[in-house]
Image (spheres, grey):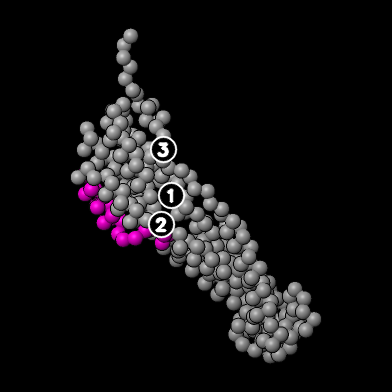
Amino acid sequence: MAETKPTATAAIKSTTSVQPVKKSNSISWLAPLTCIILGYVLWRFVIGADSNFTKPDLAGGFWPDHQGPKGNLPRMYEGGIIVPILIGALLTVITFVIERLLTVTKATGSGSIAEFIRKVQYHLANKDVDKAMAECDKQKGSVGNVMKAGLRKYKEMITNTELSTEQKVLNIQKEVEEATALELPMLEKNLVFLSTIASVATLMGLLGTVIGMIKSFSALGDSGGGEAAQKLSQGISEALYNTALGIGTSAIAIIMYNMFTTKIDSITYGIDESGFTLTQSFAANYK
């Protein structure tokens, strides 16, 4: 009976050291809801406090009809019910900016990614896998995690006598791809909130402005003379608070979204380069 040679399918059967890490993402639904509630509390009880108006509506309620704001901040209260939603959107942006900043900073690791990859390449060129893995422990980022997963398989393939060099390289590549698939979702998680708010906040601000303008012109029709002009100018000023808050929130969301995506692209490039480094090194050193 003819002897059968191992085929490329053997690479698929190889076990992996990469294990998925299960993490709760409750912040994705809890944070926006909490921020909107907090936005209403700030609008109703801080900005809309009775002491901030010359003619407060002491009856209270969900939306008291206060009159005579004593400053610019209380005028924001008269911008309408859209204002607390916009405040909630701004708080949501701040929350996810802090959350993403902590995550991306941790994923970046310590030191330069390019310098880390050069050190690993140097150790692999000297066939010192253990020192290369030690560099991964020092890096402590996503690139280091992916590189270390690939190095474990790299070390395993060195002593493997059943597979061909091509099959060993495929095993290393597969291990790197699996490790990458676990790291990237963690980096991109919750960015959708920043991109969505960046688009919606401006529209919400314009909606609040339109509602305020409708109320202003309606009041203009019910009165006349100098009082009408005064009410119109006051109504327009209050309505524009919605626009300012919406545009400001959108601007912050866009800036931070672009900053995070740029940083994530840099990490992703480092991960791709680490996978290329491992496969090329093994193919060159263990033919």
Q: Which residues are magenta?
A: 104-125
Q: Considering the numbered disc 2 on the image, is that residue within a helix, a strand or a loop?
A: helix
Is residue 107 highlighted in magenta?
A: yes
Real-space Cα separation, disc 2 to disc 1, in angstroms: 9 Å
Q: Residue at x 30, y 39 (%)?
A: 155
Residue under label 1, please give it. 183
Residue 272 visible in the picture: no
Q: Quadrant location of the C terminus?
A: top left
At which x and y percent is residue 123? 23, 48
Q: Residue at x 30, y 59 (%)?
A: 112
At which x and y percent is residue 192? 52, 56
Real-space Cα separation, disc 3 to disc 1, in angstroms: 15 Å
Mark 3: amino acid:
Thr
Is residue 225 highlighted in magenta?
A: no
Closest to the observer, 225 or 280:
280
Mark 2: amino acid:
Ala
Mark 1: amino acid:
Glu
Horizontal side, residue 115 vs residue 104: left or right: left
Q: Residues within 10 Å of mark 2 (few under 14, many from 20)?
A: many
The chief SS type of the magenta part is helix
In which quadrant of the rendered view does residue 152 lie? top left
Residue under label 2, please give it. 107
At which x and y percent is residue 47? 64, 80
Q: Is residue 250 above or below residue 152?
A: below
Cβ–Cβ under 8 Å for marks 2 and 1: yes
For marks 3 and 1, the one nearer the N-term is: 3
Closest to the observer, 15 or 260:
15
In which quadrant of the rendered view does residue 58 lie? bottom right
Q: Residue at x 71, y 85 (%)?
A: 50
Residue under label 3, please give it. 16
